[in-house]
Structure formats: structure tokens, C-alpha cells
Image: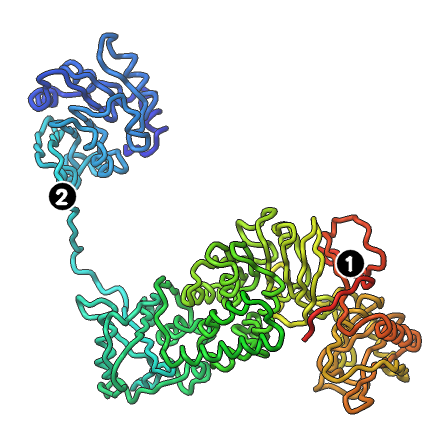
Amino acid sequence: MGYTHQAEWHDHYASGKRFRTLTASERAVLNTAFRPAGPAVALDVGCGVGELALYLHEMGYSVDAVDYAESAVELAATQAPDDADVRFLRHDIERDNLAALPHDTYDLITFRLSYAFLHNRTWLLNRLREHLRPGGTICIITPLADTVSTDRRDITLDEDEIALATAAWTTAARFEADGMTVLVLREPAAGPVSVADKPSPAPQGLIGAGVVITDEHGRVLLGRSVHGVWELPGGKPDPGESLEQATVRELAEETGLSASADDAHVLAFLMDTTSDIPRLTAAVRVTAHHGTPTVTEPDLFHRWEWHWPADLPALTGTLFTPSAHVLNTVWPGLLTELPPVHRNLVRRPAPPEAPQQAREANRLRQEMTDQLIHQGYIDNASVETAFRRVRRHLFLPGVALETVYAAADAVITTKRDRNGRATSSVSAPWVQAVMLREAALHPGQTALEIGSGGPNAALMQELVGPDGLITTMDIDPFVIERAARFLPAAGYDRVRVVLGDGEHGAPGLADKDSLDAIIVTVQAADIPPAWITPLVEGGRLVVPLKIHGYSWAIAFDKRGDQLVSRSYTVCGFVPMQGVGAREEDAVSLRGGEIRVRFPEGGTADAEQLTQALESPRHERWTGVTIPGNTPFDKLMLWLATTLDGFCRLAVDPELDTGIVDRPKGWDAAAIVRDGSLARLLNRKTGPSTWEWGIHAYGPAAEQLAEEMAQQVLAWDRKHHISDAPLLTVHSVLDEDTKPSGARTLVKRHARLDFDWTHPHHADSA
């Protein structure tokens, strides 16, 4: 009858059921052990219908009797004499506040047939000790487990439970009364908790450590084992050893290298399975050592070699699985497609890097910053200071320092999909410098980065200082794990790292006026409301926005509920994932040789266009020329925002038959209408001069060619080569009249109004 719910107890008493009555033997024990010498107060816990409480009153106690079954308390109060000094209260002794009891302390606290039903009996007994008066007593009356049938043992205590109940008391007496055991507990004992082991356990798994140790050049030590695999040094701990002690002992035994346990740092615990046996591997980084690697155990290893981390993805031979996981802990993402592992990181300060590597990285970092200043990408002291301080290479382990600190072209891919397409990268320093300059971050501000890599968030934290707050978020757990590892290791543990879809903004930063700036470091096809609403008035959004297939990092100011552009910088980023990802409409012609893309949506009749391409080509040269190595991205934007039917044309080089001239670099700007196609191209007319022209195909070829040519001529007459339109971004729900002269592009979330009557100059590269 082991009741576990309050409702069961209520129904028990309400239906007229009772427990065994107080026996003469029990009364005798109570009289002998607990009769008060003067006024005294008792607490009866689990009083039921009040029989014990009333007897305690007869003995001379003033009694508080509590039970959590309402029907029990009501019956007890009804049956009690009017002059009885007993207060019956509904009180859950385990959940309700003990301070709500009528008295702070008691001379006697009793449990009759109730202690076994308590879920947290040891905890409660400890708490009730605090409510005993000096010399007070706790009394537990309970049947013994070995005196009742098996099906009733849940209402009893066994000898282990009795020993546990009496262990915390200096005086613990025990009486027997008609098959009941009466425990008398006095003088709480003060002492520390004791500890003990279970009997000898059966082995449950494997445990060991993998040790990453590098030389002064940053190369990692691997051994060629007799089992035909490459392994890190390491092994299992001996009894009594810490992992750090085991690490340096194994290192000495296997390689002859000496190290101190103080220089061994546990970075993570890795759990996997081998031959159906759980395996726990500690990833340990040793930061200082002495000696030269030597084969000291030829029965285990043939030789030891130093390897560049960057070479490990293409290492000749096989890596021992735990060693591969340890290497991927020190250099996340270095090795791909490893077997599954559960990785639990140990948060601790990053170990120091090799002195020679640190000096070389600092030299290259200063040179990179000098180049960015000379090239005009950095033009203020705060951004300069940030670039000189952020150790970019700590976010790109295994990548050559010269590559990490190349100012112009250091876009470094950190993850690819199965088709080899980049899904995450660290942006080139010049792009980061431009976006940070345009974001105009100041000390104390709050800013969000969408698309994590690590270095950019560190630069942002430098700009907002210790009183500012930077949050970086990404949809990819792999990317977030890298950022969460590398940012603290580089000294930027104040950056908040969030896993989530940037389309929806960051948790806690979605309300109006929550952010001073947002920097998006993935290519976005749209601007969702979550990137506008949180910005303060005048706040900045810098986003690589894709417009008709071209991408510019556009800086916007927030004005009311709108965004207004202030600069454009042509750039390329990995595309956004998640809800914000967009697939382009496209038409394939001639078996895939030619592909016509409609980045903002659209379609064309493939059969009509194929026939058009087989018709005679119409050429129209404009006489508009451009010097070599001159950016012309704004001309593409002009055509995209002034021509109906705008699209992009690409030719597969492996299928190219020459029916159309294959575009060089970017896909060709084109228009498709009326079963016809016209595309832009150029030809060399001088040593460093190129002329714009149009090739057109189909029944409306001449009309489309002339229309496109007139727009090229209009661009040449009206605009500087770097002119960009004033771009205003509205919500798609905004019904405001668009400005005069603006061309409009409607996306899923935003309406883009391009006003070429008020152009501004912009950076291009």
C-alpha cells in the first residue's frame, strides 16, 4: 500500500480507512522515553486522524499535528476534544516552508507510520534537526521490513534505512513494541560526510590520453606505430595518477621527451566506441618540453616525425582514430569525415603558442595592416589598432601564416559541402576592414555579427571595447564550435557565441533599439525585418546583398522604418543557409552548354531560345570604352535596374561549341524577351582599352541589342564609373510612394528602390 500521491492519501482517509491503533506497548515506550518534566511542545508529522497527537497532549505536550491529506486533518480536528491543546494543520512537510509551522522549535518531533512514506527522508531529517530545542528528541515509529510480507515492505524500514536514520545522532536508542520499532534520536552529531567505494567494479571501458606536442616551428609530433598507423604520444593512466601526470610519464616513456605536468593541459574529453567497448580519450596539449624524440619502445613504434598541421588532411598512411579526434580538438575542422565522437570541452585559458611562431605572426600582422592602410581600406586609428592586435592565425590553425596574413586575397575556406562548395570561410582582411569602417563601431556599443568565423567578431570586440557587447551567430554547429573555442583562446571571451538562423536575428536582441550595428558576413538574398527593427535610429547594417546575381557589401543607415544606402563595395561571400537561402531560377540550353539564370525570379522558353541562338547573330557596338583593370560593377547594376527581362548568361567551358562567346570572369549581363536574347560583352580596341557591345539572337535581336546599347550609352553620358544609386529598403508591407525616378525590386521581405537621380560614389574592388 505504498501511496505516492497526495490524492491517494486524501481518498484513503475520506473512505473511512485507518492504520493500526496505538498499542499499549507503544504507549508504555512513549511514557518512559518522552514524558515531559514541564511545559513542552511536540510536532507530530503525518498525524493521520490524530491518535498519537491526542496521546501526546495527554502526556503534557502542546501539539502541532500536520498531514498533507486534507481529509485526515478534517477528521482529526472533528474528533478532538474541544479543550485539547492540539492544532491540526494541512502541511506538506517535504514541500511547504518549515517556517510556516506554528512554532520555530520543538521538544519532540514524531513520525508514526509515516517516515517510510517520505521521498526525501534523509534531507528532511537533517532539516528538522534545526527545529529541535536543546535536548530535544526525534521519535520514529515504524514496522520492520523483515516482519511483514513482501508486498507490504514499501511501508517499512529495513536495517540499512534504520542505520542511516540513526547515523547522524550522538544518542540513538531503539525499542521494540508489539512488532513496531521505536527509534529515539537525540543530540545531532556534527561531522564531515564519509566516503567509500563500492565492491570491486567490473571493467566498463577504455581510458587514455592523446598528447599534442609541437616544436618551435609549430609542427606536431606523430609516431609510426607497429600497427601501421600514425599516432600521437599517449596512453592510459596508472593507479593514482592524474591525466596530466600520466601524459608526461607516457611522453617520456614513448619518446624520451621530458615535460612538467604543469605544462600539460586537458582540452577535452572524447567519447566513442571501439569493438562495442566505450572509449574515453583525453585531448591533452603539452606546451613545453625538452629533448629530442627518440624511439624508446621499438615494440610499439618504428619512428617519430614532426608534421605540419596543414599537411595532415593529406597525410600518407592512416591515422589512429582517437589521435585524429584529438588533433581535431586542437585544430577544429582540420580533419573531415571522421567517425562520430562525443566531445566535451574543458574551458581553460589557451596554452601559449610557440615563441618563434608568435614572433613571425606578429611581423606579418603588422605588415598586413600597413598594406591595408596604404591601399586605403583602413582610414581610422581604431580599426588600425584592432587589426594590429587581433591574432588572426589563432582562428585558422594549420593554415600557413603567409596565407593568413595576406592582405588582398586571404579568403580562407573553413568548411565545404560534399560537392566541394564553400559553406564557411574567413573573409579577406581588406573586406573586413571595409565592413568595419562602414559599421562605424564605437566603444560601449552593442553589435551583432551574422555568420561566424572568429576574427571579425574579435575585431568588433576591439572596437566596442570592454563596455561594449558583441554577439556572433551562425546556423552551423561546426562553425559555432570553432568560434566558441577560438575566441576565448585568442583573448575574446566576452564575445557571445550563439547557434541559430540569422534570418531571425539573435535571441535577446530582437527588440526595437537593441543594436547599434549589424554586420552580415554571408551573402544575403534579402533583408528580413529582424535586421531592421532592432537597430537604433541611425544604426548601421552592413550586408553583402545579392542583387540580380551580383553581390555588394552595402552599408545602410536606419532612418525611421527604412534603410538608406551610404556605400557599396563589390565582394563575394558564401551564401546564406537556412530560411534565408534562395535558389535561382535558371534555363538550360543546348544540353547544358548555355545556362540562363534569373537571380530575382523569372523564366524563358528553352526551345524558343535554342532556336534563337541558331539564328544569325546581330552585333551592336556602342563606342563606349573602358580602360583595362577598371571596375565596371555599377554598369551591371545600372543595366539590371533599367532593363526589363534582365538575366545572366554562362557557358560551360567543357561543352562550349562557340555558338556564343564565352564570358570571361562574371557571367554575362543579358536580357530575354519575345523569344530573343541579347548579352553584353567587350572587345579590345587598344593596348589597354575595351569597347562595350551587344550580341543578340532571335526575332527581336535588333530591338533588344539597341535597347541594351542605349542604356550603356546613357550610363556613359550620365554617370561616373563608380556611381551607385541611392538605395532605400522598405518592408514589403510599406505602401509609401516610391521616390521619383526609382526602379523597384521586390523581394520576399523587402522592397528595394534604386534612385539613380541621386547617385553616390562607392568603393569597388
- Residue sitting farthest toward the bottom: 687
Q: How is the image coloured?
A: rainbow
- Residue density around tag 2, few if under 14, some if 14–19, many if 20 or more, within 10 Å: few
Image quarter of the C terminus: bottom right
Dot 1 falls on a residue whose secondary structure is: strand
Residue 608 can be seen, yes or no: no
Q: Quadrant of residue 649?
A: bottom right
In the rendered image, residue 47, in percent from the top left (x then y), is placed at 24, 23
Position of 168 with respect to 549 (left or right) is left
Q: Give the camera-side residue of 412 and 159.
A: 412
Q: Give the camera-side residue of 464 and 182.
A: 464
Residue 388 can be seen, yes or no: yes
Q: Give the camera-side residue of 367 and 251.
A: 367
Query: Residue tagged by mark 1?
Result: 753
How many callouts does the rendering have? 2
Query: Residue tagged by mark 2?
Result: 191
Image point (42%, 60%), residue name: 493
Dot 2 falls on a residue whose secondary structure is: loop
Upstream in sequence: badge 1 or badge 2 = 2
